[in-house]
Amino acid sequence: MTSAVSRRWRPRSLLQLVLLAFLMVMLPLAVLMFQAGQALSELSRLAEQSAREAVQETRRARTLGALALEMERGARQYAVVERESLLAIFDDRLAEFRRLLARQRELLPDDPDVEALSGLLDRLAELPELPMEAFEARLGDFLPFARHTEAMRHATNRRIDERLDAIRAQAEAVQHRLWWQTAALVSASLVLMLLFSRLIVRPVRQLERRILGIGSGGPPARGAPVQGPAELVRLDERLDWLASRLDELEEQKQQFLRHMSHELKTPLASVREGSALLSDGVAGELSDHQREILELIDASGSELQQLIEQLLDYNLLQHNRRLETERLDIATVVKEVLAKHRLSLQQKGMAVTCFDGPLSWWADRTATGHILDNLISNAIAYGEDGGELEVRARVEDDWLLLEVANSGEPIPEEDRPRLFEAFYQGRIRRKGALKGSGIGLSVAADCARLQHGSLALVDDPRLAVCFRLALPRPADDDDTPDPVAALAAHDARKD
């Protein structure tokens, strides 16, 4: 039921999910931009209107002051020259002053100076009707008239300043509101980004875990099915097919190795048994030349058996064989492996130098024996005739460092990065009748990793080839030191 609902609401493709995420994340930002544009438009309109009204009101106040001055000048000139035209000009200025004062009253409805000017205008309007003596006596009314006109101009300026302060306060309020809206909408965008990122990243991480599980070679751990875009769901289905296909191929490989080892070991046992019977003289005495050929056949059979055993060891290690650690005398293990190769070393004419025991350490006997056997076999196969073979061991910083070094041709630099890859064969050719399989060092490196150690090719000041096995001291917990770091620290101290 849950899976069906989730699939119903899942975007059809990754492109649709990305586009939907983009639109959802941009939606709060678009709302923010729209609201900011509206607020800025409103503030711009108020500022423009306020500026226009301020200019008009300031101009009107100045005009009223100029009219008051002209009215007083015209009245005083009439008192001197008594020309009727001056009274006509006086009447025109008075009417204009009254009209502008009525408009100024809208700006200053309760201003006492405006009220006083209205009363004085009524008194000044009576001047043309008065005789000359009374006219001259009333000229003193222009002094309070000019004073109230100037006071009205200052009141107009104050009212304009108050209006500008109100617009400024409104702009600050809009700014604070925009900041809060910005914080809220950007936070919403971030939450949506995280949500859609999780919707995209979660199935990708599920696929990554599936790929890592398939590549690790362990048992498949099938988790919850991938729920996301159709492309990722199809990829998850392809991974299921790939995992089943890899299981089939692994089973075929194991079956091939089992059959091959059985089919090869059976005739090989007959060959080696026949060569042993011939060596014992069952078929009669052998000449020296025949015995030399028989020894070559027996040596080749031994090498072929060793190759088969290496393949079996490689197959076993690929299935993560469990370790059986025990306290061993490493010197004894080394001597056992050297005794196994005694005849080959004598035939090679190599001088063997081994460290003195005892040296007790916790390790897996079989895995450690495989490592030493492969290293010594390589030293015999690739070392120089009549050369040197040294096996050294020491303990440093809770690590056992076991080195197998031999003289001969050094390993080329281009071969070193791939030296421990399975089935890789370098440029130096193996000495002997049979060609190597290229898995000996891979098996040895796997045996070292099983014991939480490492196998590395290191530089030796005297011998051309030196392999170093590092095994950690077991601890009560799983906090095992890094072998690569320990070896690097040891090399740094040596330098």
Image (tube, rainbow, N blue to C red):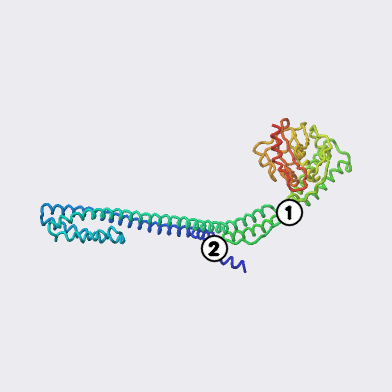
Horizontal side of 440 relative to 357 (left or right) equals left
Residue at far bottom of view = 1
Q: Nearer the viewer, residue 187 or 140?
A: 140
Q: Where residue 132 appears, x then y in whole percent?
A: 12, 57
User: Can residue 63 be seen by looking at this rendering?
Assistant: no
**What residue would you read off at disc 1?**
254
Q: Which quadrant of the figure contains the C terminus? A: top right
User: Can residue 465 be seen by looking at this rendering?
Assistant: yes
Q: Which quadrant of the figure contains the N terminus? A: bottom right
Say which amino acid is labelled 2.
Answer: Pro
Q: Where residue 25 appears, x then y in whole percent?
A: 50, 58
Q: Where residue 133 appears, x then y in whole percent?
A: 13, 56
Q: Residue at x 71, y 38 (%)?
A: 487
Q: Quadrant of residue 114?
A: bottom left
Horizontal side of 249 relative to 171 (left or right) equals right
**What residue would you read off at disc 2?**
11
Say which amino acid is labelled 1.
Answer: Gln
Q: Nearer the viewer, residue 282 or 51?
A: 51
